Image (spheres, grey):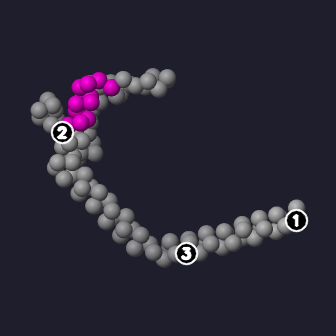
Amino acid sequence: MSPQGISDLPDDPAEFPTSRLIHEFGLDQDEPTDGAVKVSMAERRVALADAKCRQSSGYLTTLYNAEWAAQAAFLHENEDMFADRLTEIKKFDDYATATINKLGAQR
């Protein structure tokens, strides 16, 4: 990001843009009520450089894999809870279907 004139990068890419850039680009101000937001060419260049950097550094792939692993572990660790919840959902679905059929037959 140095070629973009950004030397104050945070340690965590999720904390980008920096407070300096947020202020510089006016992102710390209220947006127009008509929904029209103007994005400067400088902001676009920084955003593009940031996206390219995240991709080329392997950050996005690493983040994706870490999130996938965490979610898979959560599902595995809570398998019984999800099975119980599925049973509850099926019972409610059966009840709702029976109620609809009963009330529909009364017409």
In the rendering, which numbered label is found on residue 106?
A: 1
Classify mark 1: helix, strand or loop.
loop
Please state which of residues 56 and 70 is positioned toward the viewer in this rendering: 56
Look at discs 1 and 2 and give the one toward the viewer. 1
Q: For mark 2, what is the residue? A: 9
Q: Is residue 52 left or right of residue 91?
A: left
Which residue is more in the foreground, 77 or 69? 69
Kind of element beneath mark 3? helix
Residue 107 placement, left or right of 67:
right
Is residue 40 on the magenta stretch? yes
Q: Quadrant of residue 6?
A: top left
Q: Amino acid at mark 1?
A: Gln
Which residue occupies the extreme left position in the image? 3
Amino acid tagged 3: Asp
For numbered disc 2, what is the local secondary structure? loop
- In the picture, measured across the screen, residue 80 lies left or right of residue 50, that is right
Residue 41's image quarter?
Answer: top left
Residues in magenta?
A: 39-49
Reading the image, the residue beneath label 3 is 84
- Measured as percent of width and height from the top left, residue 34 is found at 49, 23
Q: Quadrant of the N terminus?
A: top left
Quadrant housing the C terminus: bottom right
Can you give x and y, in whole percent of width and height, for residue 61 in the image?
Answer: 24, 56
| Pointer 2 or 3: first along the chain | 2
Q: Mark 1 or mark 3, which is nearer to you?
A: 1
Which residue corresponds to the image point at 78% horizontal and 68% vertical from the top-left?
Answer: 101
59 and 11: which is toward the camera? 59
> Residue 36, how many percent across, how many down?
44, 24
Looking at the rendered structure, the kind of residue marked 2 is Leu
Residue drawn at x 85%, y 67% as measured from the top left: 105
| Residue contact at pointers 1 and 2, CB within 8 angstroms | no
